[in-house]
Amino acid sequence: MSSSLRRGALAAAAIAFSIASLAACGAGHNAQTLEIKPDHAATTVGDIDVQNAVVITQPDLESTGPAVVAVTLFNNGRSDQTLESVTVPGTGKSAELKPAKGEKGDLVVPAGGRLILGGEGNAAAVLPSSREALQDGNAQKITFTFSKTGEVSLRALVVPAESYFTEWGPSDVPSAPGATPSDTASADASGEPADGESSGAPSAGESAGAPSGEAGESGAPADGTSADADGTSQENGTGTDAEAGH
């Protein structure tokens, strides 16, 4: 092979190597970008950005309580938009839209602002219970309808109100069976029904220590020594009158 051919081959190899290197860098960056996905579903239609959408169900699979849609809605336009409805196929009807705490009226996504659905004190989109349609782990289609943009649809994960999602999940969580009796039992054990016990002792005991309501809630007065003393006098049958006499 002549020297000119060798030089040409080396030049071609160098160019090929350079192109391959650049392609690798570009592919690497693009690949990393594509691999980075939001924790929850997101989409953009017109001026509306839907981010971090998720359907949160009851933590108990046997529960018939409602589910909620948690999402952040951004309005990149110059005019306010009203969220008219949130629907999930299979649940039977649109979600019940509730304004944030202390507010009334429609749910509005302000121009250049955002609207948060889900979480304490925020606006809410409450879905009727439907375990057939809302199965944990599935990607469920959700459609948001806005006053100007119209329908915006995407698929979002269905997760139970556990761990991180507890604070964003349904506020109406039915009590477990038997919760009421246990609550009553704990109330009896705490000593709240102290009226019957205090009826045998004069009100002087109240003025000497903490209020009877506080004592009933904590199960003991603020002064632990006086509590022991009162308890001893009552067991001996002397009562607080006897102590007052001394």
Image: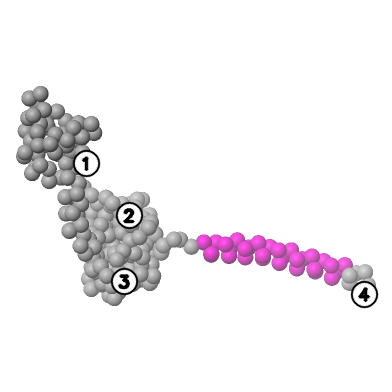
Which residue position is annotated with label 4?
1
Image quarter hosting the C terminus: top left
As drawn, 129 above or below 112: below
Front disc: 3 or 4:
3
> Amino acid under label 2?
Glu
The structure residue drawn at horizontal position 38% and vertical position 64%, both measured from the top left corner, is 45
As drawn, 101 above or below 156: above
Residue 79 at x, y percent in the picture: 31, 53
Cα separation, mark 1 vs mark 2, equals: 28 Å
Which residue position is annotated with label 3?
134
Which residue position is annotated with label 1?
218
Chain-order first, disc 3 or disc 4: 4
Front disc: 4 or 2:
2
The structure residue drawn at horizontal position 33% and vertical position 68%, both measured from the top left corner, is 142
Q: Which residues are magenta?
A: 7-36
Circle 2 Cα neighbour tier, 10 Å, few/some/many (<14 / 14–19 / ≥20): few
Cα separation, mark 4 vs mark 2, equals: 75 Å
> Amino acid under label 1?
Ser
| Most foreground residue, 140 or 207 | 207
Cα separation, mark 3 vs mark 2, equals: 19 Å
Residue 244: quadrant of the picture? top left
Front disc: 1 or 2:
1
Q: Say what secondary structure mark 2 lies in.
A: helix
Is 164 one of the magenta-colored residues?
A: no
Q: Is residue 155 left or right of residue 194?
A: right
Chain-order first, disc 4 or disc 2: 4
Chain-order first, disc 1 or disc 4: 4
Cα separation, mark 1 vs mark 4, equals: 99 Å
Which residue position is annotated with label 2?
167
> Amino acid under label 3?
Leu
